[in-house]
Structures are given as structure tokens and as C-alpha cells.
Amino acid sequence: MLIETRNPDGPQPDFDGAAEANHRIANHLAILAGMVRLQSQRLKQLSQPIHPAEAAMSLADIGARLETIAELHKALARLPHDETVVLDSYLRDVVANVVNSLSGAAQTKLELNIDAACRFGSKRTLNIALIACEVVTNSMKYAHPSGVSGRLAVTCNCAGADLILQIEDDGVGLPEGVDPQTSGNVGFKVIRALAADLGAQISFHSDELGVTFRLVMPKAGIAAPAQNNGVAASRSG
């Protein structure tokens, strides 16, 4: 993973690296805990016992989220506090890990086009990656229910004032009547909560050619304070 350190030769303020690392890890794990609680609430509401395959998929989802956080901390642990993360290699690793863990027998053609100029602090980087993780997970699970091979394209551009993240699959589209902006599905809830924490706008387009997800986030900072949604943790990166 590439890392840019700001003003490496200038004077550095007093900094308690261990305390900052502990705070950062606590926040990131709080985000994950919120996601797991949402999943637990969904399972409690089921009227029938959960099928072993669904239980295995739920655990795989949690594993993918843990790997997303772990990959970020592997890099951050070696750095001073005044850093920004280059999103390119980190996001590539996250998406590839999800695809590899959920592909099964069918192979997914993964296309990645991520702008190397995209750099953010750890909190914003993690939120962007977790959103990508959720969208890719949904595509891997539902785009091709017959089990055929598919295509997944992830693009991320930082030209202009906004970051634009777009994820497209070539599957069957969303089920009729499902609105990702209001759905109670855990993955959609997580995506909406993390996007709100970033001050980002999200949209989904679905038809018989697949689903396209698009996130637009101001690079300058969070546009509005996040609401208490049970997923996002305090302190922006």
C-alpha cells in the first residue's frame, strides 16, 4: 500500500502514538460491531431456522469486513500520525479479497480502474472501503443466482472537487420492489449509514443488464454531521 506523509521534514508536535493507535482501532472496531449488531437483529427476526449456507455466508461477510479493517491497520501501524492513505492499492486489495472469498466455483471477471491521486485519512478511507466491501458482497451474492460467471467493474476517480466511486455488475438486477435507499436489508443499511458519515450522496441503478452503484463524496470534507445510526463511530479521518 502506498502512503503519503505530509511535511516529513518539518517539526512534529508531541504525539502519543500508542494512544492514537488505540483510539483509531477502537473506532474502527466500533463500526464493525455496529454492522454485526444489525446482522444479529435481522437473524432474530427470521421466522424459520437459518439455512447452513446462509449462516456460512453471514460469517464470510463478517470475515470480509474484518479483513478490510486489518489491511488498513497493517499499513497505519508503521506510520506517523500525520498521514494520508493512497486509496488505489488499498481498495484493490479489499475488493479482490471479497471477490476471492465469495467467488465459489464460478469465476468473476474483475475490472479495476482506481485513480492513484485519491488520498484520505484513515477514517474516510475505511468508510469508503467498507462501502465498496458491502456493494461488492451484494453483487457476488445476488447478481448471478444461477451460479454463472460474471463481470464486476470498480472505478474510482478524484478529478475535480469530488471523489466518485462506481461499482457495476452484469447480473439480473435488483428484485422488483427493492429500493436500496429505504430497504431494511443489512447491507443497504450499512451503506447508507457510512455514506451519511462521509457526507456522500449514493445512488443505485438497476435493470436487466445489472446494477450500478455510484457514490459522490466531497473531497474537502464531510458536508453534514452524521446521524446516530448505530454503525458509524465518532471522529472523522
Image (tube, helix red, strand yellow):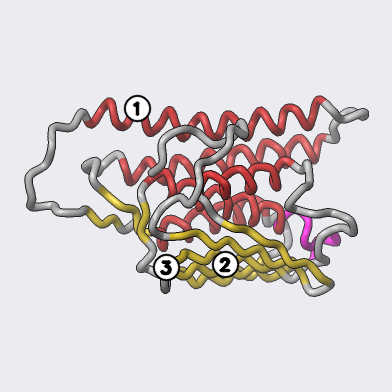
**Disc 1: CA contacts within 10 A as few (<14), some (14-19) or many (>=20):** few
Query: Is 172 drawn above or below residue 54 in the view shown?
Result: below
First-in-chain label (2 vs 1)? 1
Amino acid type of the residue that numbered disc 1 sits on in the rendered structure: Asn
Q: CA distance from mark 2 to mark 1?
A: 32 Å
What residue is drawn where x is 35% and y is 59%?
Answer: 119
Q: Which mark is residue 154?
A: 2
First-in-chain label (1 vs 3)? 1
**Disc 3: CA contacts within 10 A as few (<14), some (14-19) or many (>=20):** few
Q: Which mark is residue 161?
A: 3
Amino acid type of the residue that numbered disc 2 sits on in the rendered structure: Val
Predominant SS along the magenta part: loop
Secondary structure beneath dot 2 equals strand
Residue extending furthest toward the right: 48
Q: Quadrant of the C terminus?
A: top left
Secondary structure beneath dot 3 equals loop
Q: Give x and y (percent) for residue 224.
A: 50, 47
Q: Quadrant of the N terminus?
A: bottom left
Amino acid type of the residue that numbered disc 3 sits on in the rendered structure: Ala
Q: Which mark is residue 22?
A: 1
Q: Which residues, given as a range, are shown in magenta?
A: 140-148
Q: Give x and y (percent) for residue 150.
A: 72, 69
Secondary structure beneath dot 1 equals helix
